[in-house]
Amino acid sequence: MTTVARLLDRLAESGRGLIFLVNLKDTLDSGFDAAPLREVCRELAAAMAGTPDASPTPDELVEDLGGRCVSRGFWRHSTEPLLQPNGAAPWTVLSRVTTYGRFFTSVMDRRPGAPRLAVPAPAELGAGCRSEIRPEDVPAVQDYVDSGRWKDDVDSGKVRFGGHCVWVAPQRELIRRQRHVRKPVPDYYRDIIGLSHLMPGHHLIRLDLDLDAWTGGTRVLRRRPHGACNGGPRFRMTYDGPVCSGNWGRTVNLAVVAQYRNASLNGVPEMVMEPFTVPLAAVTAQYLGEVRSKPETNDGYFLRRMTPEPIDRIVRALAEALS
């Protein structure tokens, strides 16, 4: 029979799996209840035992276990007022950066059969397609987004921030940090937010939520995504520096990881929320441009920066906590 210990050993066979385990231990060390996680691990271990000839890869296990944890609501925090996120002076504008594809399908809510727009639908990267938008269509898309004409095509009258969770960052922090960076604007945003899945050819759009124009009350909040809750391979639970107050966490600055620098890995403050909708009047959008550089992919270096503790000790501690 496949045990939880075997499940953890399987995860430890890949760099991403090891990053997941480090975040998992940090999560439990931060005071989260191990019982629900133990239940999910046993459930997944039993599923593996039932299909021994179709053993998933470590990276597939990361996706499966992380997805189960998110869908069960683990790592949620209590409902808090969004307008006072850190107990001090509130941020007045929060930003979410997304791809043109996500903007088109989620914010614009374009589905098969929906009326065509004045701008083209995004192309899917891959199979010889290197960009979401053809070069000749970029000016039209930029004007459409920056001018606010996109709001005329949102049938519901509201902007939907969708997905299994929604991250937001303080706009002023994103802009303040941008002044000191020379790389292209979209690549900067990709790196400072830690969006390691965004590749050359993605076109980024920043959606800014004006809290003064939205009286949305409270929302259920979670900490920033990290590698143990399906947040991606370049997120951490712990920080190298002062811990952010309240439910704010920090992203990983991919540029620092890529350059093997000894500087702090911290990106910008970030919060993760449940999906929500806001009035059109509370949202503005800005076209940022096309990502040109590849994200860093060095699991080994990132793992060394995450923890000084031997990995085998981390795996043993998790096995004891979850078996």
Image (spheres, helix red, strand yellow):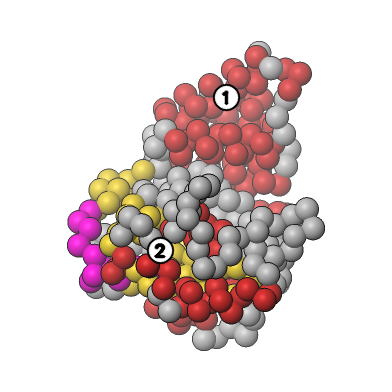
The magenta region covers 208-218
Give the number of the mark in front: 2 or 1: 2
Count of numbered circles in the view: 2
Q: Is residue 192 magenta?
A: no
Q: Amino acid at mark 1?
A: Leu
User: Split into 4 quadrants, where in the image is the N terminus?
Assistant: top right
Tell me, yes or no, if residue 194 can be seen here.
no
- Front residue of this view, candidates 156 and 242: 156
Q: Residue at x 53, y 47 (%)?
A: 112
Pointer 1 residue: 44
Q: Amino acid at mark 2?
A: Asp
User: Hey, which residue is sitting farthest right in the picture?
Assistant: 128
First in residue order: circle 2 vs circle 1: 1
Q: Residue at x 64, y 34 (%)?
A: 61
Q: Secondary structure at mark 2?
A: helix
Q: Residue at x 32, y 59 (%)?
A: 158
Badge 1 crowding class, 10 Å Cα cut-off, few under 14, some 14 to 19, many 20 or more, is many
Q: Position of residue 15 (x, y in %)?
A: 71, 47
- Front residue of this view, candidates 189 and 322: 189
Pointer 2 residue: 153
Q: Secondary structure at mark 1?
A: helix
Q: Residue at x 47, y 24 (%)?
A: 39
Q: Position of residue 232 (x, y in %)?
A: 58, 51
Q: Is residue 309 above or below residue 122?
A: above
Q: Position of residue 111 (x, y in %)?
A: 49, 49
Q: Is residue 26 above or below residue 144?
A: above
The answer to whether residue 312 is left or right of residue 231 is right
Q: Is residue 151 above or below residue 30?
A: below
Q: Are marks 2 and 1 in contact (CB under 8 Å)?
A: no
Badge 2 crowding class, 10 Å Cα cut-off, few under 14, some 14 to 19, many 20 or more, is some
Tell me how far mark 2 sits from mark 1, CA to CA. Answer: 43 Å
